[in-house]
Image (cartoon, rainbow, N blue to C red):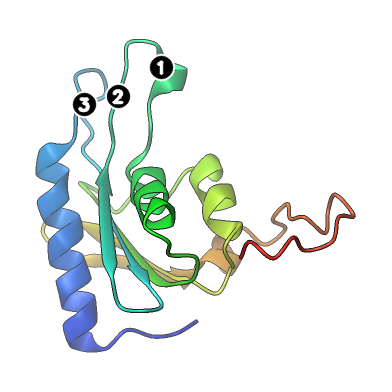
Amino acid sequence: MSPSSDSELSRLIEAAIRVTENAYIPYSHYPVGAALQAADGRVFTGCNVENASYPATICAERTALVKAVSEGARQFTTLVVATRDGGSPCGICRQMLSEFGVDVRVVLITLEGRIIHDTTLAALLPLNFTNDSLNLPDNGTR
């Protein structure tokens, strides 16, 4: 886990809270914002986008991850997730994030910026499914 400095963490917290304003949540009314910091310092944000066909909904964490990967980022240091109660990433988000490593710091906060939990992805998903699980060689895409 590569710790963020206090100023970097503050910047991520602000970004995660700010992006909740863009959440499209007509069904759950539960805004989620995520700020994902790449190893090179870039920050990618995402919010949850719901759909009447519930499986088509995408979580804030995966939105941020997909944006990051589409811009060439493959290594990450910190993820901040903002919800009204400090909720944790769902299992699908945890698994998708783990594709790029489990040493990511995960900070769960309220919409007011109060830190509820400060942990790692490894702690949230101790037995992640990897290419090793498939008995495949690392294909060099990490």
Q: Amino acid at mark 3?
A: Ile
Among numbered discs 3 and 2, the one appearing first in the sequence: 3
Q: Quadrant of residue 110?
A: bottom left
- Mark 2 crowdedness (10 Å alpha carbons): few <14, some 14-19, many ≥20: some
Q: Amino acid at mark 2?
A: Glu
Q: Which residue is mark 3?
A: 25
Left or right, 87 with reference to 129:
left
Question: How far, Cα to Cα, is label 3 from label 1?
Answer: 11 Å
State yes or no: discs 3 and 2 in contact (Cβ < 8 Å).
Answer: yes
Q: Secondary structure at mark 3?
A: loop
Determine if residue 2 is in view: yes
Q: Quadrant of the C terminus?
A: bottom right
State yes or no: discs 2 and 1 in contact (Cβ < 8 Å).
Answer: yes
Question: How far, Cα to Cα, is label 3 from label 2?
Answer: 6 Å
On screen, residue 135 above or below 58: below
Q: Which residue is mark 2?
A: 50
Q: Quadrant of residue 15?
A: bottom left
On screen, residue 101 above or below 33: below
Q: Residue at x 12, y 65 (%)?
A: 14
The percent position of residue 83, horizontal first and vertical second, equals 24, 48
